[in-house]
Amino acid sequence: MTRRELDAADITASELRDSYARCRALNARHGRTYFLATRLLPVERRSAVHALYGFARWADDIVDDLDARLSAPDRDRRLDDLERDLADALRNGGGDEPVVRAVADAAARYDIEHALFRDFLTSMRSDLTVTDYPTYADLRAYMHGSAAVIGLQMLPVLGTVVPAGEAAPHAAALGVAFQLTNFLRDVGEDLDRGRVYLPADLLAAYGVDRQLLQWSRRTGRRDPRIVAAFEAAEAMTRGVYREAEPGIAMLDPRVRPCIRAAFTLYGGILDAIAQQQYDVLHRRAVVSRGRRAVTAACGIAGVVGARWRARATGSVPIDRASVRHLRNLQRKEPGSE
């Protein structure tokens, strides 16, 4: 499907097509939940979304590279190199890294604010030195760059039926909701990296601190205080989903099935966490294959409906190849992010 997506987006230069394909591969490998949802987008917009995700994934991998030979200063220098490459590419086009070439091209095509990329890299750099967040306000400040800006970068690509400024707070909230979901799901893995993203004041309210989390992670034993704290973190995250949800109706009707599917799938991760009684320190919560299939089916129905309505107005043909591909994904998808 890569060639068809690139053709539809009018991306013709060979090197640039290769760069976008690299981003798509990163999305497919690292973000299976998100990748499934992108299959519901109009075909001409998918490459830009892959570029945004691919760049974010590339920067995140620099920070979290498990190569023990790389010190924090080494990673910081690599981020500096990436930031310089991106700044030059945003001004002049091109770029040394394939992900930079693709994301700079996408930013130019959709007039994405350059400051959003700077804010993102600032948060990525803080991961090299910051290992916990005393309050939720501190965490939200970090997530502005690490998550909210992703929603804001996506907004010009997706398109809106209201002024973009009206939809922007909801788009930012959706990025934050997705990241909070990942923080709760991955709390054990993050702890292994020396980080605790759940706010310290929320944990302390239930008698939980880093030492207790490490004890539970190390011994495999559970503690009711941890369960209560994680339940509170789930409730906090669902509140952000409620902030985000009204924004879906503000998007271009053809992209709503994609964002609704992502909203449902990530919310399903929270459901899975609750169903396993918040035992995220010892096992990874995943959305069941059945639930993913149902979500994909609803997404397919939404895509078909939106495109038939658009076709009735003469604005766009139905993309039958995409619908067939989505049905294949629905049958073949092996697991969850």
Image: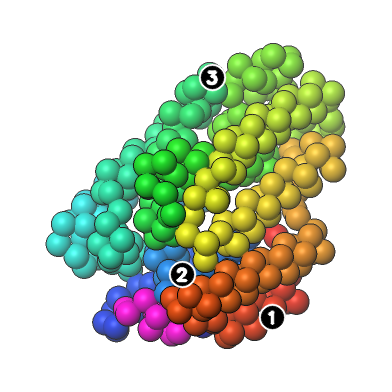
The single residue placed furthest to the front in the displayed view is: 313
Q: How many marks?
A: 3
Observer-nearest residue: 216 or 168?
Answer: 168
Can I make out residue 182 in this image?
A: yes
Gap in angstroms between the C-alphas marked 1 and 2:
18 Å
Q: Residues within 10 Å of mark 2 (few under 14, many from 20)?
A: many
Q: CA distance from mark 3 to mark 2?
A: 36 Å
Could you tell me the amino acid type at mark 3? Answer: Thr
Q: Identify the image quadrant of residue 183.
A: top right
Quickly name the residue at label 2.
46
Amino acid under disc 1: Asn
Q: Magenta part of the protein: which range?
A: 3-11
Amino acid, disc 2: Arg
* Mark 2, secondary structure of its residue: helix
Q: Residues within 10 Å of mark 1 (few under 14, many from 20)?
A: few
Determine which of the numbered discs, if any, sits on residue 135 in the image: 3
- Label placed on residue 328: 1
Residue 279 can be seen, yes or no: no
Mark 3 or mark 1: which is in front?
1
Q: Quadrant of the C terminus?
A: bottom right
201 sits to left or right of 123: right
Task: Single out the mark in the foreground, 3 or 2.
Answer: 2
Q: What residue sits 44% from the left and 32% below the top?
A: 142
Rendered location of residue 229, percent (x, y):
73, 24
Task: Based on the picture, tell me whether residue 7 belongs to the magenta stretch.
Answer: yes
The tag earlier along the polypeptide, 1 or 2, is 2
Which element type, helix, strand or loop, lies under badge 3?
A: loop
Can you give x and y, in whole percent of width and height, for residue 82 in the image?
29, 53
Residue at 62% across, 37% down: 242
**What is the crowding at mark 3: few (fewer than 14 residues within 10 Å), some, or many (at least 20)?**
some
Rendered residue at 54%/81% (across/down): 318
Query: Horizontal placement of 104 versus 36: left or right?
Result: left
